[in-house]
Image (tube, rainbow, N blue to C red):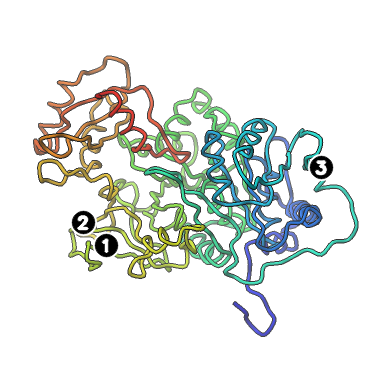
Amino acid sequence: MVVGGDAKPYLVSDIVEDNAVWAADEPAIIFKDRTWTWREFRDGVNTLRRGLSRQGIVRGSRVAILERNCDEYILLHYALAGMGAILVPINVWLRVSEIAYILASSQPSMLVVGAEFADTAAAAINALADPPRLLYRRGGTSGHVCWSDLLADGPPVTISTPDSWDDPHIILYTSGTTGRPKGAVISHRRTVLDALAASGAYGIRTGERFYCYMPLFHTGAWDYFKLFFYRRGAVVLAERFDAEEAVELIERHRCNGMFSVPLTLRQIVETPSFATADMSSMRFIAYGSYDPSNVMVRVLNAFRERGAHEVGITHVYGMTEAGPFISFMPPDRAEQKPGSIGRPLPGVQLRLLDEDMKPVVAGETGEICLRAPCLMSGYLNRPEATAEAFAGGWLHTGDLGRVDEEGDLHLVDRKKDMIRSGGENVFAKEVEQILIVHPAIRDCAVVGLPDADYGERVVAAVMLEKPGATDEREVIAYVRQRIAGFKTPRQIFFVEEFPRTPAGKIQKHLLRESLLSAVS
């Protein structure tokens, strides 16, 4: 897109340069014992651009990274964005074969690797016919590029720039809750417009600070960063989640907001140090996923007891393909309706459509479909999957929703989680919402398993508050008293942990596989 002759549109990377002018000495990134001001952030990004250019990185190049959260990870992203190059974050929890799959899919020119993952990365690229060059952030071996090489002085070099607002700047791979991950291509246009809409909706104030433990291969990190960066604020970054450290960082750096999931927030308020901490700086807590046992009310009260009198909760709904700001329930209403994800953000066109792509009537269940600037450009090298996702001109989320009598949106279930048992439709989430209220149950998941008589049978995996707190017969009877018999689980499996995505979502395809193995 060209505006005013040769003028270029505002890009993701422009925020760093602007803040270095208007908030030069204010903090931008706080990581461990290091604070980057906006001037230092800008200078660090420019140094990296020169170093990357000398390594042959140009507009359109892809650079993958396998590393835990760190300040240099953020600098790398903004350096690449200003060059028209693309960051490809890789989930550090993946195994060698899974990493090799993403590298083969994204075909990066270079793979940046933390020392902790050096052996894993080497094994992954050995499986590839055309492996990327390795760049070690710390350490390294002879013949490979090191991070220090990017920072070294060298001859002048030409640095590429984005040509268009529609150039991609990051490829985020889906969490793979239903199978192989796909690379969602994210453009400058999408990120900039989404930031403008969401920062206003959230009411982010100038100079506020965001606490982030979410891994940097997740949309819940980058898309919240931009809200605070656009308001000349700062990110307080944790390498990984630790409940005690979360309390210490929020208190020490006077953080104002965070994004999390109920399970993690519960761990924070239950940690011993929270009982004496000063949380008075906190203004909002955004959370995704469903709210087991009404945890958020307890979390909110706990923060208020520690001095956060202004704090509110915000229930948000999002996905990798559309970012985390599709719809949200604002703080002034979230306490009264914790089960609702509210209404779409400005600029998001949301409809509930049936199988024939027609809007459902009020109160009925339909698939949540979207048109908006916040959407991905498509899946990398997956034209058929992209066409399926955007069938009829709408992004199909795969989530089922309904709108209540007050006009607020509720998630009903994942479309693929609907269980067809004996000719009846059973929504797994409806059963889960019954189970989670049981006083002995900490968390749960409901799936369908093959059944010779019914097609599928409803089963539940349950994590107890304490081992032996209840048994299968009692749990089944508890559910049967509250919903129809055909919706009641026929089997209860007691588990110690669930397979989860980085955002805390239960990976039901892995759970289903393990349950199938258990009954076979």
Dot 1: what SS? strand
The residue beneath circle 3 is 148
- Circles 1 and 3, Cβ within 8 Å, touching? The answer is no
Query: Which amino acid does the dot numbered 3 rest on?
Result: Ser
Query: Which amino acid does the dot numbered 2 rest on?
Result: Thr
Sequence-first tag of 1 and 3: 3
Dot 3: what SS? helix
Residue 352 tag number:
1
Q: Nearer the viewer, residue 231 or 275?
A: 231
Residue 365 tag number:
2
Q: Is residue 333 above or below residue 267?
A: below
Question: Looking at the picture, how far across and down is residue 360, in whole percent?
Answer: 20, 64
Of tags 3 and 2, which is closer to the observer? 3
Total number of numbered labels?
Answer: 3
- Number of residues whose C-alpha sits closer than 10 Å to that of mark 1, classed few (under 14), some (14–19) or many (20 or more): many
Dot 2: what SS? loop
Q: Quadrant of residue 298?
A: top left
